[in-house]
Image (cartoon, rainbow, N blue to C red):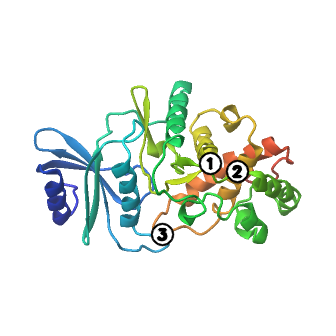
Amino acid sequence: MDAPSPDLQRRAEAMLRKPPVSWKRIERGYTPAQRWVVTLDGGSSAFLKMGDDILRPGAAHTTADGLRKEYRVYSQLGASFLPDMLGWMDEPAATILALEDLSGAFWPPPWSQPHVDTVLEALTALHATRLPGAASVYENIDADPTSGGWNEVARDPSSFLTLGITSMDWLERALPELLLACGKARINGDDLCHFDVRSDNICIRGEQAILIDWNWMAIGNGQLDTAFWLPSLAIEGGPPPERTMPTAPDLAAVVSGFFAARAGLPVIPALPLVRDIQLAQLRTALPWAVRALGLPPLDGPNAPA
């Protein structure tokens, strides 16, 4: 049977106070933390994320660090856009976060406009929520979505150009406008932000969207949180970004710069799929910035059609 180690099983049983009957590994998403749905004696179930304090190659923090940050959210907030927390264990050999099992909810894609509206309503509620002591995007560099954007591409364009989306000539012509737009963007703010809104972190139950994976949580401008969701939404058959944000050239520049500075970098051993999804989002985010800023058409051999 595919299951966690016997030690982790014993710890989960002690935390949940019921013996596990069966285990199902969850592969969705990009985190290296172990994720399981466990069925318990009596028929109830739970979703478990298991981490440790081992620093993996290419990782800035351990999986346990991420779970501790998530626990901070779940332990202080009770909100309709959050799953219920069922248990928490933080010991030297294992860090385990137990949440309600959302396997029966709808996990997009496909997207419909009502689904999109439901997520936007949840984000509005999230951004109006206050979490005492939460760090701002500037105080918590790991949650700063502007770190290494078009300024980084301007300093060293080599990794971006290897993607073949634009020529150097296009980049030289477009960078002044992109940098100017980024400079106008409002990043800081008082909104509680998720900063990792993607379909693998969203499910819909009834008329409520529920967000999971809170290890990038920070305080900032909620509009930036929404803007980072829109490229992945469009990739999955949702509306183009400007349908949700019709006048946001500054945010389009910030979002495209985030992916432009990262998509061409070497693969992260601990997160081998991240560069692929960053490239996919760049291929939607950069055309959005081109349209919003009136930039020249993308001219690289791999430019999106």
First-in-chain label (1 vs 2): 2
Q: Amino acid at mark 3?
A: Pro
Q: Residue 30 appears at what percent x and percent y?
A: 45, 56
Q: Secondary structure at mark 2?
A: loop
Q: Amino acid at mark 2?
A: Arg
Q: Amino acid at mark 1?
A: Asn
Q: Residue 235 appears at what percent x and percent y?
A: 60, 41
* Residue occupied by mark 1: 221
Per the model, the C-alpha gap separating discs 1 and 3 is: 31 Å
* Residue occupied by mark 3: 269
Numbered circle sitting on residue 186 = 2
The answer to whether marks 1 and 2 mark residues whose Cβ atoms lie closer than 8 Å is yes
Q: Residues within 10 Å of mark 2 (few under 14, many from 20)?
A: some
For the residue pair 18 and 33, the one nearer the viewer reads as 18
Residue 232, quarter of the rendered image:
top right
Split into 4 quadrants, where in the image is the C terminus?
top right
Q: Residues within 10 Å of mark 1 (few under 14, many from 20)?
A: many
Q: Secondary structure at mark 1?
A: loop
First-in-chain label (2 vs 3): 2
Per the model, the C-alpha gap separating discs 2 and 3 is: 33 Å
